[in-house]
Image (tube, grey):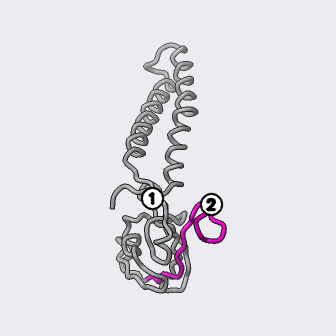
């Protein structure tokens, strides 16, 4: 599918990198300096932990820097209206009639518990191109087959006033 992300997802990754660089890393660097000043570093738990935490922060910053460069931000377009594509908010009904809304997002921002389904997940792949009223049969790794109905499809246009882009 490619490395897609919503504008909101990209903003979160950028905010995480900014926080690590401007807040977390300077704080831990200061703690390591203070711990180093206490003397013997080989038995200094604060120093050892701090150095380990700095390596973790630097590793995450390198990952985020590379990942952000690889991602393609996808903005919804009016032509998508009525069909499920990347970024869509899709209300699904399961076999018991329970309704749940999910947004189709890239793997970097996927969090099913928070209503964000990866476009690369079995359910995400099955929903692409579907219309309201369509049924999909999804084979999930843990739960087996499940039948879902597409109840509603909407897009967040960002700055909309009446459901259409401004």
**In the rendering, at what x and y percent does residue 90 appear?**
51, 74
- Residue 165 inside the magenta-drawn segment: yes
Q: Give neighbour class at mark 2: few <14, some 14-19, many 20+ (Cα, 10 Å).
A: few
If you read the primary sequence from the N terminus, does the residue marked by circle 1 or circle 2 appear first? Answer: 1
Asked whether 156 falls inside the magenta stretch, the response is: yes
Q: Is residue 86 above or below residue 109?
A: below
Residue at the disc numbered 1:
74
In the rendered image, the quadrant that contains the C terminus is bottom right
**Circle 1 SS class:** loop
Q: Position of residue 140 (x, y in %)?
A: 37, 73
State whether residue 139 is above or below residue 3.
Answer: below
Left-right relation of 91 to 135: right
Residue located 46% across and 30% down the image:
54
Viewer-closest of 150 and 84 = 84
SS assignment at label 2:
loop
The quarter of the rendered structure image containing the N terminus is bottom left
**What residue is shown at x 56% (from left), y 24% (from top)?**
31
Q: Residue furthest right?
A: 161
Tag 2 residue: 159
Q: Position of residue 91 (x, y in %)?
A: 53, 76
Q: Which residues are magenta?
A: 148-166
- The residue positioned farthest toward the front in the image shown: 166
Are dots 1 and 2 in contact, CB under 8 Å?
no
Residue 128 drawn at (x, y percent): 39, 73
């Amino acid at each position: 599918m490619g490395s897609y992300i919503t504008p909101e997802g990209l903003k979160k990754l950028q905010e995480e990198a900014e926080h690590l660089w401007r807040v977390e890393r300077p704080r831990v660097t200061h703690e390591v300096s203070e711990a180093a000043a206490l003397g013997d570093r080989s038995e200094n738990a604060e120093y050892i932990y701090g150095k380990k935490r700095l390596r973790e922060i630097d590793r995450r910053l390198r990952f985020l820097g590379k990942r952000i460069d690889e991602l393609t931000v996808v903005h919804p377009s009016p032509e998508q209206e009525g069909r499920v594509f990347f970024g869509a908010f899709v209300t699904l009904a399961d076999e018991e009639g329970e309704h749940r809304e999910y947004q189709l997002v890239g793997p970097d921002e996927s969090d099913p518990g928070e209503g964000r389904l990866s476009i690369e997940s079995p359910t995400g792949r099955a929903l692409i191109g579907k219309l309201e009223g369509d049924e999909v049969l999804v084979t999930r790794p843990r739960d087996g087959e499940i039948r879902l109905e597409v109840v509603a499809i909407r897009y967040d246009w960002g700055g909309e006033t009446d459901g259409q882009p401004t």
